[in-house]
Amino acid sequence: MPRKAGASGRKTIESMAKAAKKEKYVLRLYVAGTTPRSQEAIRSVTEICEQHLAGRCDLQVIDLYQQPVLAKGEQIIAAPTLIKKLPAPLRKLIGSMADKEKVLVGLDLRPRPQRRTGHEK
């Protein structure tokens, strides 16, 4: 006799959500010196780690002027760039980190907003 998906499906979704809340995040933020944009990126990403990933985030800030070899290895073409190494999938966010909502979506901490098709009222 086939099982009903209702309750067991809900348990699976809940267990996946709990597992995601325990995952360790490994982030690398590449900045260019101590420019205002670099400082803003550091401040914004640090706040996101403290507020949304407390105790489960390894954030490494890398100054491209101090360690240019690391930029080549990661194929960094602009700064600031935030790379989410773990959990998979790998993600790269390039440019301003001021819009925290976009950063949260990019880190898979918020669902992507649904696109409007123009047919809604």
Image (cartoon, grey):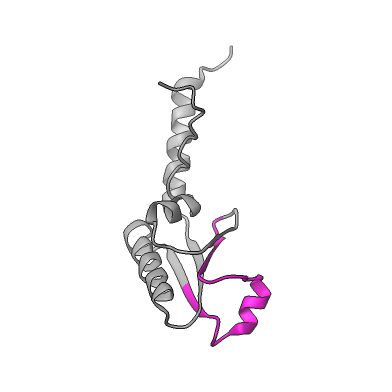
Can you see residue 54?
no
What percent of the width, then of the height, locates residue 80?
50, 70
Q: Is residue 66 magenta?
A: yes
Name above or below for residue 116 compared with residue 61: above
Residue 47's place in the image compared with 11, above or below, is below
Q: Quadrant of the N terminus?
A: top right
Q: Relative to residue 73, is residue 56 depicted above or below?
A: above
Residue ranking furthest to the bottom: 66
- Give me the residue at 49% from left, 22% from top: 119
Q: Residue 114 placed where, x, y %?
A: 47, 35
The quarter of the rendered structure image containing the C terminus is top left
Instruction: Decide if residue 84 is on the left or right side of residue 120.
Output: right
Q: Residue furthest top?
A: 1
Which is more toward the observer, 60 or 45? 45
Query: Residue 29 appears at what percent x and percent y?
Result: 50, 71
Place residue 90 in its image quadrant: bottom right
Q: Residue at x 46, y 21 (%)?
A: 6
Whether residue 91 is visible to the viewer of this picture, yes or no, is yes
- Marker count (numbered): 0
Tell me the residue at 42%/46% (across/down).
110
Report if residue 97 lies within the magenta region.
Answer: no
Of all residues, the one furthest to the front in this rendering is 118
Q: Nearer the viewer, residue 93 or 73?
A: 93
Quadrant of the image occupied by residue 71? bottom right
Looking at the rendering, the stretch of residues picked out in magenta corresponds to 60-87
